[in-house]
Amino acid sequence: MTIDELITFCEEEEHGCRVRCKRYDDASGFTRSKDKSVRTADAITEEVYGDFYKEISATMRKYQKIKKIANDKNINGDLLRMSEIRWVLKDGDDD
């Protein structure tokens, strides 16, 4: 599986989790009432899993950027390359 395929997989799984979470919330009445006492464990689980998949895809995007920087022949010098990688790790969350 390539990194792009993994990111796509995680994005699709996240979407599925969000859809299922909404269905559970709609069925329990949580969507209308916002009463946390009626929210189901299934909805909470799907929300948590959706967050996990979102985090995995964000991490894989960072990895892609780091891999691109590490292989970029136009960046001269290890210090410049490391500063680019540090920037991705610190600030470059998505794009």
Image: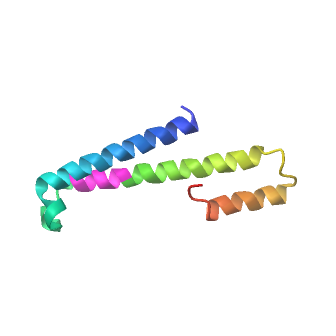
Q: Main secondary structure of the magenta part?
A: helix
**Residue 26 shown left or right of residue 58 in the figure:** left
Q: Position of residue 33 (x, y in %)?
A: 14, 66
- Tell me residue 9's x, y (percent): 45, 38
Q: Position of residue 84 (x, y in %)?
A: 74, 59
Residue with the most extreme right position: 76
Residue range (magenta): 42-50
What residue appears at the point 32 percent right and 43 percent down from the top-left corner?
16
Give how far across and how far down residue 60 sits, in percent.
Answer: 55, 47
Q: Is residue 58 toward the left or the right of residue 81 in the image?
A: left
- State left or right for residue 70 relative to residue 63: right
Q: Nearer the viewer, residue 30 or 83?
A: 30
Which image quadrant: the C terminus?
bottom right
Residue 5, magenta (yes or no)? no
Name the residue located 36 percent from the left edge and 46 percent from the top edge.
15
Camera-side residue of 19 and 48: 19
Of 42 and 61, the residue lying toward us: 61
In this rendering, is residue 24 above or below 79?
above
Queried whether the magenta region covers residue 46, the answer comes back as yes
